[in-house]
Image: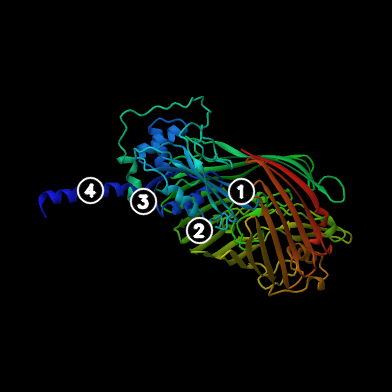
């Protein structure tokens, strides 16, 4: 080939490579820590999704560059400037919010060139941990938006496409375009962040006007990107951090809600209360963070007390996260289990059943614990140590107690290091399935009654707690539109290993099997079968022991086998503002039941109105029937900020 021809061919190859390179280059996307309680774990899941097709730049890398550039708060210009410094083609922010018994993940994608919103993904899921199918559903909506991002080094005109996608958690949501950005002010034509996401104008708390100063001469990116390029991604902060956070204590968020409940027979109110729950998530460094949630509950009246002001520190812990490892210490709420409402492997938390709330998750109580965990995309191991166990607060209707019985103050249990609770969990995940093995040694957090004193006319009982060891399994699998869940445990009371004392809970095998399926786009149906079996059982009715009879009623061991079931039918409107559901539970032996219709309306993203009814029925000497005095109609107004 002649030299001139060779030069011509070489020139063509170079030009083609130059044209192909931008299209084939792997996009660089900054993922900021997702805002909301539990956002740390969701951030890791979203990182896994983005890593399929993009190089993920960490929140710490983005924040360091923001600080070095002297940018006080984040608007479109600020996002674009930081992205240019990091050579990031886009920025992904997000929120993780509890929506009744579901969780809503909102992801906002911004252009690295303009800082404008180019798309939004909303996914509603049932569990705190995203399943493989849910990650795939998010990927199907998020990755096309990432692919459409223009490279930050492109000089060509044209604006980024604005997309807005939603899903219902089943992976079958439609994707639609909402137009194109105009490059002007505001969100550039994109949808608002929504669902509690922070506005693009920043926090405005320090009186800044939106201008920012650049750190002079700081154009080198080599030192900041060293960690990122070494391992593909950098580990994330443990807890969520909203878009405008600068360090220190971070933004104060939370919710306020008012609750009223009246009995169905028209008697006095069962509860009138107003609550303010505040949370903050300080970030100390790239790997160290903290979380605090403080609850103020003002009670005008309730079934157990009159006027009262309760102040409780629901959670307060510090976290260290690095390269898949997590160390967390402090007051924590750690729910375990895969099934709905009934969780045989939920050994770590307790509940306050005496304070009525619409969302059962809000009744959980945490404990001072240390958590050590390590996670990979398919394997996770957790170890939890709890020096002092949390105790559930239960409702005991006076009509269900034998004649002449009074309840004294609970038995004191002194703190002792030998009584420290230890729990471990090993979880494996695959495409569309997961399974976990759980072990526990500690205390039964649900109290049982013991005899304090007895006379011819009066019996005095009090609540106490017993030591137990337990092991269990939980898992789920998705097959088409069906989601199957199973969970089970074997609980062995250490001081009643063979059921010798009939007044105490005997050893128990406890299992739940459930299936869930969407019907169309807006309705979901979930059914569960629940079984309890007591291998060392004796009939409490044969002993004529009032303590045994009362414990058997409230701890549900009146029969050797206790089959039951639950059914939930839920509807959500297309825009997500109207929600309706009916939940039912029934014990097949005794025919006692609970029915709960619930209606919710969200006029704006931050305000939720809910009304419903709890109806307990069946024989008074059966667990759910005995709760008939607590049947009632309720309403709640909540505002999230």
Query: Which mark is nearer the camera, 1 or 2?
Result: 1
Judged from the image, the secondary structure of the residue bearing numbered disc 3 is loop
Query: Which mark is nearer the camera, 1 or 4?
Result: 4
What is the crowding at mark 3: few (fewer than 14 residues within 10 Å), some, or many (at least 20)? few
First of labels 2, 3 by sequence position: 3
Q: Residue at x 10, y 52 (%)?
A: 2
The residue that mark 1 highlights is 98
Judged from the image, the secondary structure of the residue bearing numbered disc 1 is strand
The residue that mark 4 highlights is 14
State left or right for residue 147 relative to residue 396: left
The residue that mark 3 highlights is 232
What is the crowding at mark 2: few (fewer than 14 residues within 10 Å), some, or many (at least 20)? some
Residue 282: x %, y % from top left: 51, 39
The front one of 560 and 529 is 529
Q: Residue at x 59, y 51 (%)?
A: 103
Residue 343 at least partly seen: yes
Alpha-carbon span between mark 1 and mark 4: 53 Å
The residue that mark 2 highlights is 382
First of labels 4, 2 by sequence position: 4
């Amino acid at each position: 080939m002649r030299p001139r021809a060779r030069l011509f061919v070489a020139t063509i190859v170079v030009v083609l490579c130059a044209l192909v390179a931008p299209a084939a280059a792997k996009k660089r996307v900054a993922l900021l820590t997702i805002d909301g309680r539990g956002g740390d774990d969701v951030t890791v899941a979203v990182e896994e999704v983005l890593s399929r097709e993009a190089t993920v730049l960490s929140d710490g890398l983005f924040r360091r560059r923001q600080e070095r550039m002297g940018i006080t708060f984040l608007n479109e210009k600020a996002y674009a400037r930081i992205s240019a410094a990091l050579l990031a083609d886009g920025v992904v922010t997000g929120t993780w919010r509890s929506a009744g018994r579901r969780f809503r993940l909102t992801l906002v994608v911004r252009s690295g060139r303009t800082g404008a919103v180019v798309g939004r993904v909303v996914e509603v899921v049932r569990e705190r941990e995203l399943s493989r199918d849910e990650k795939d559903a998010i990927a199907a909506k998020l990755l096309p938006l990432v692919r459409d991002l223009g490279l930050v080094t492109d000089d060509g005109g044209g604006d980024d496409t604005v997309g807005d996608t939603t899903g219902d958690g089943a992976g079958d949501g439609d994707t639609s375009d909402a137009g194109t950005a105009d490059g002007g002010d505001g969100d550039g034509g994109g949808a608002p962040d929504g669902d509690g996401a922070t506005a693009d104008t920043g926090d405005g708390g320090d009186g800044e006007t939106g201008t920012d100063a650049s750190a002079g001469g700081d154009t080198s990116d080599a030192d900041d990107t060293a960690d990122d390029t070494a391992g593909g991604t950098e580990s994330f902060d443990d807890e969520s951090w909203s878009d405008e956070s600068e360090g220190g204590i971070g933004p104060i968020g939370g919710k306020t809600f008012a609750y009223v409940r009246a009995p169905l027979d028209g008697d006095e109110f069962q509860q009138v209360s107003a609550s303010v729950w505040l949370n903050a998530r300080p970030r100390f460094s790239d790997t160290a963070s903290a979380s605090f949630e403080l609850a103020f509950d003002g009670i005008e009246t309730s079934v157990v007390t009159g006027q009262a002001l309760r102040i409780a520190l629901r959670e307060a812990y510090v976290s260290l996260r690095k390269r898949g490892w997590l160390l967390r210490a402090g007051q924590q709420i750690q729910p375990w289990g895969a099934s709905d409402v009934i969780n045989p492997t939920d050994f770590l938390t307790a509940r306050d059943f005496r304070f009525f709330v619409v969302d059962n998750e809000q009744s959980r109580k945490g404990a001072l614990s240390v958590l050590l965990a390590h996670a990979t995309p398919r394997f996770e191991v957790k170890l939890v140590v709890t020096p002092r166990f949390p105790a559930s607060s239960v409702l005991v209707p006076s009509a269900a107690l034998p004649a002449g019985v009074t309840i004294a103050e609970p038995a004191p249990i002194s703190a002792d290091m030998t009584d420290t609770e230890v729990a471990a969990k090993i979880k494996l995940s695959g495409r569309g399935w997961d399974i976990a093995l759980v072990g526990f040694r500690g205390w039964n957090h649900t109290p049982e009654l013991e005899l304090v004193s007895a006379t011819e006319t009066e019996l005095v009982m009090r609540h106490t707690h017993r030591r137990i060891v337990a092991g269990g399994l939980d898992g789920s699998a998705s097959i088409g539109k069906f989601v199957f869940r199973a969970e089970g445990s074997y609980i062995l009371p250490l001081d009643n290993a063979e059921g010798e004392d009939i007044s105490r809970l005997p050893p128990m095998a406890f299992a739940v099997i459930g299936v869930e399926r969407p019907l169309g786009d807006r309705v979901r149906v979930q059914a569960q079968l629940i079984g309890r079996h007591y291998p060392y059982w004796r009939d409490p009715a044969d002993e004529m022991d009032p303590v045994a009879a009362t414990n058997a009623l409230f701890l549900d061991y009146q029969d050797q086998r206790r089959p039951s079931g639950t059914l939930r039918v839920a509807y959500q409107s297309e825009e997500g503002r109207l929600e309706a559901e009916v939940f039912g539970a029934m014990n097949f032996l005794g025919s006692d039941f609970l029915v709960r219709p619930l209606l919710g309306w969200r006029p704006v993203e931050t305000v939720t109105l809910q009304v419903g009814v709890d109806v307990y029925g069946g024989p008074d000497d059966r667990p759910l029937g005995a709760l008939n005095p607590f049947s009632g109609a309720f309403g709640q107004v909540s505002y999230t900020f």
